[in-house]
Amino acid sequence: MCIMNGMTKEQSGLEEFFRTYPELSFKKNDIIVEYAESTNYILYINRGEVRQVDITATGNELTLNVLKTGAFISLPWVFKTDNSLFSFRANNSVVVRKAPVADVKKFVEGNSEVSLEILKRVSRGLDGVLLRLGAHMGHQAASSVRVELYLEAIRFGRPDKENKTTVSILVN
């Protein structure tokens, strides 16, 4: 894996591909994709963080995932044509690029290195989902908290000189 300017060649290729598509900007808490919205496009996050949310039966908003710069909204749309199962909201100031699904699919199919990078991302994400599922199935609140802190450290932590990871968590 070749790293250029802090990003891999594959990440650079993705940015280059999406650069030719329209840029959209959102403010904090703006809805980027609404639940059940038609999904004939893929969004690439150029800057910012996006929350993937679901609404519980009681009407509470549940954050399922936080997507960072360089992530897609939403990769499964390349493989299925259903409307969005979730809504996506800006966690802060967000800039995305919007490309048609067919163009993204053609690009990914023609670039094995990019496909491998995407597969790595999906694999890491699946590990997180399975950790959460295991903690939930164990019915132990302490296990769930440990898993969430571990996942926060992996995704958002910053290692120091002693290779200890620090995570800033805002508690409302």
Image (cartoon, helix red, strand yellow):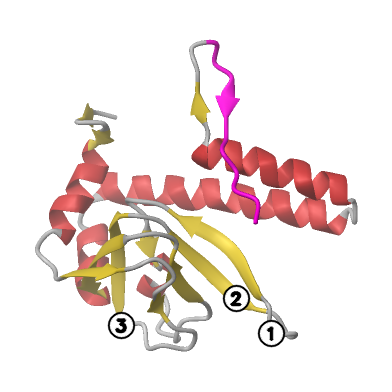
Q: Distance between the residues labelled 2 and 1?
A: 9 Å
What residue did someone put label 3 on?
A: 40
Residue drawn where x is 42% and y is 50% of the image: 119
Tell me the quadrant of the picture where the N terminus can be found. Answer: top left
When asked about the image quadrant of residue 37, the answer is bottom left
Q: What element carries label 3?
A: loop
Tell us which disc is closer to us: 2 or 1.
1
Sequence-wise, the earlier of marks 2 and 1 is 2
In front here: 93 or 77?
A: 93
Q: Position of residue 135 (x, y in %)?
A: 80, 51
Q: Residues within 10 Å of mark 2 (few under 14, many from 20)?
A: some
Q: Are marks 3 and 1 in contact (CB under 8 Å)?
A: no
Residue type at the position of mark 1 = Gly
What residue did someone put label 2 on?
A: 54
Q: In this view, does 158 lie to the left or right of 139?
A: left
- Spot the residue most to the left: 20
